[in-house]
């Protein structure tokens, strides 16, 4: 165990010493989600000095509640900073996401499973920092709207977006 931890620390130190002058892509995870059993990873690719595209995937499994799900998202970021190029600085982005959720429920003393498909969209704004070490920090907020079709009813409504992502930027 100690040997594995030492290898991981050496690898992380080596990666952090690489320069990321012009980030050609960033891979990010949401560390807060881990506390709630949610794994989220995002890949962001700059398209120009002021724009980028980000694709995300999410997975969670709350087996104690009989709930699991997967999702995907896409966003197109507009960066506004005059002092830096994408993917650094202030940004705004329209977002689109889809998801599938399965859950168990009791009906007439039997456990049944239902699956739900949802689609949503919204807008978010934030700031992304990318240091020379390649470490990236993405903080954002916004508002989204989701529609989901359940077996017995349909749901639609708004929700706040608040996030934090940590990652690594790979240079050219």
Image: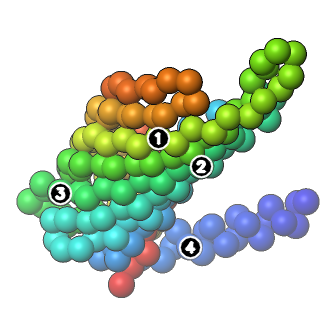
Q: Nearer the viewer, mark 3 or mark 1?
A: 1
Q: Which residue is mark 3?
A: 79
Label 4 neighbour load within 10 Å: few <14, some 14-19, many 20+: some
Q: Which residue is mark 2?
A: 70
**Kind of element beneath mark 4:** helix
Instruction: Looking at the image, tell me whether mark 3 or mark 4 is earlier in sequence order.
Output: 4
Q: How many callouts does the rendering have?
A: 4
Q: Nearer the viewer, mark 3 or mark 4?
A: 3
Q: Which residue is at a point 38% across and 34% down the rendered structure image?
A: 146
Q: Which residue is at a point 13% across and 56% down the rendered structure image?
A: 81
Residue contact between numbered discs 3 and 4, judged by CB atoms under 8 Å:
no
Between marks 4 and 2, how big is the CA–CA gap? Answer: 30 Å
Indicate left or right for 143 with 65 as reference. Answer: left
Label 1 neighbour load within 10 Å: few <14, some 14-19, many 20+: some
View extreme (right): residue: 1
Q: Which residue is at a point 26% across and 65% down the rendered structure image?
A: 52
Instruction: Looking at the image, tell me whether mark 2 or mark 3 is earlier in sequence order.
Output: 2
From this view, report whether residue 53 is shown above or below residue 21.
Answer: above
Residue 138 x %, y %: 38, 49
Q: Which residue is mark 4?
A: 15
From this view, report whether residue 90 is shown above or below residue 23.
Answer: above
View extreme (top): residue: 108
Q: Which residue is mark 1?
A: 118
**Kind of element beneath mark 1:** strand
**Kind of element beneath mark 2:** strand
From this view, report whether residue 131 is shown above or below residue 114.
Answer: below
Between marks 3 and 4, how big is the CA–CA gap? Answer: 26 Å
Indicate left or right for 119 with 108 as reference. Answer: left
Q: Nearer the viewer, mark 4 or mark 2?
A: 2
Instruction: Looking at the image, tell me whether mark 3 or mark 1 is earlier in sequence order.
Output: 3
Q: Which residue is at a point 39% across and 72% down the rendered structure image?
A: 25
Instruction: Looking at the image, tell me whether mark 4 or mark 2 is earlier in sequence order.
Output: 4
């Amino acid at each position: 165990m100690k040997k594995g931890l030492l290898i991981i620390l050496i690898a992380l130190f080596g990666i952090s010493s690489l320069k990321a002058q012009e980030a050609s892509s960033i891979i990010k995870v949401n560390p807060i989600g881990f506390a709630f059993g949610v794994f989220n990873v995002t890949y962001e690719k700059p398209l120009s000095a002021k724009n980028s595209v980000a694709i995300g995937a999410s997975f969670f499994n709350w087996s104690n509640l009989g709930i699991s799900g997967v999702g995907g998202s896409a966003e197109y970021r507009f960066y506004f900073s005059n002092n830096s190029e994408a993917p650094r600085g202030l940004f705004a982005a329209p977002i689109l996401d889809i998801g599938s959720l399965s859950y168990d429920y009791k009906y007439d003393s039997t456990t049944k499973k239902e699956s739900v498909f949802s689609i949503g969209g919204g807008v978010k704004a934030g700031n992304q920092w990318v240091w020379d070490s390649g470490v990236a920090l993405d903080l954002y907020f916004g508002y989204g709207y989701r529609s989901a079709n359940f077996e017995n009813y349909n749901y639609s409504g708004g929700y706040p977006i608040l996030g934090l992502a940590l990652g690594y930027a790979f240079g050219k």
